Amino acid sequence: MKSLLEEVRRVEQEAELLIRPEELEAALDLMATEISHRLGDTTPIILCIMTGGLVTCGKLLTRLHFPLQLDYLHVSRYRNQTAGSDDIAWLGKRPEHLAGRHILIVDDILDEGYTMQAIVAFCRQAGAASVSTSVLLDKASARKTAITPDFCAFTIPDRYVFGYGMDYKSFLRNAAGIYAVSR
Ligand SMILES: O=P(O)(O)OC[C@H]1O[C@H](OP(=O)(O)OP(=O)(O)O)[C@H](O)[C@@H]1O
Ligand SMILES: Nc1nc2[nH]cnc2c(=O)[nH]1
């Protein structure tokens, strides 16, 4: 643990700030307006993807002023590492009562796309009336699947990022901006 903490401190010190907190807040305002226009009369279920989606989803929720319900799904493909594994671990309970409902999936980042692809498939199999996807960050140049987000705040370069819910080896989720790990 001691050497991991030393590594985390070094990564934090050497990281490059990509997006400032006030830019994130402004972008969430815009994203919330767009979501409200498109989904505001559908009484959607907002599906927060834990753990990384926690901050984005929480900050988005308080900007949505229409009837909605909140649920969550806990999946992990990176398992607190900086590269994804071949399989997605489904942790905890899976949401029920999705049949016939409009679903908005909210996550922090769309990278290679395998995680979102699997969650969209799960919602469709559960009989959702529609499935929309919303991410704070789109690492479009790293994509290995055909998925594109319906709502997205920023497109970022192919760098490993942390902050605003996103981790570096399970730490630094509490950083207020978006930081890229130094190369
Ligand atoms: O597009 P992909 O390459 O599949 O990666 C995107 C996923 O990776 C992260 O989750 P992670 O597995 O790290 O779990 P976490 O949310 O607990 O950090 C992130 O929160 C997305 O859900
Ligand atoms: N923390 C973090 N998780 C990810 N999951 C997929 N890409 C990333 C990334 O750049 N940072």
Image (cartoon, rainbow, N blue to C red):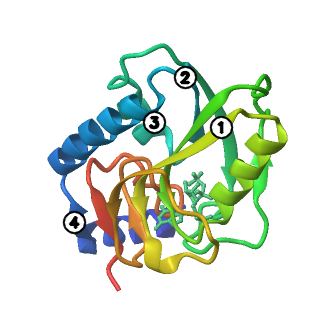
Q: Is mark 4 within 8 Å of ligand 2?
A: no
Residue 130 x, y percent position in the rendering: 65, 37
Amino acid marked by disc 4? Leu
Numbered disc in front, either 2 or 4: 2
Which circle's residue, 3 or 2, is located before the other in the chain?
A: 2
- Kind of residue at badge 1: Ser
Q: Secondary structure at mark 3?
A: helix
Marks counted in the figure total 4
For disc 1, the marked residue is: 130
Residue identifier under label 3:
57
As helix, strand or loop, the secondary structure at mark 2 comes to loop
Q: How far separated are the C-alphas under marks 3 and 4?
A: 21 Å
Q: Which residue is mark 4?
A: 17
What amino acid is found at the position of numbered circle 3 in the picture? Answer: Cys
Residue drawn at (82%, 36%) of the image: 126
**Residue placed most toward the observer, 4 or 56:** 56
In this rendering, position of residue 173 left or right of residue 176: right
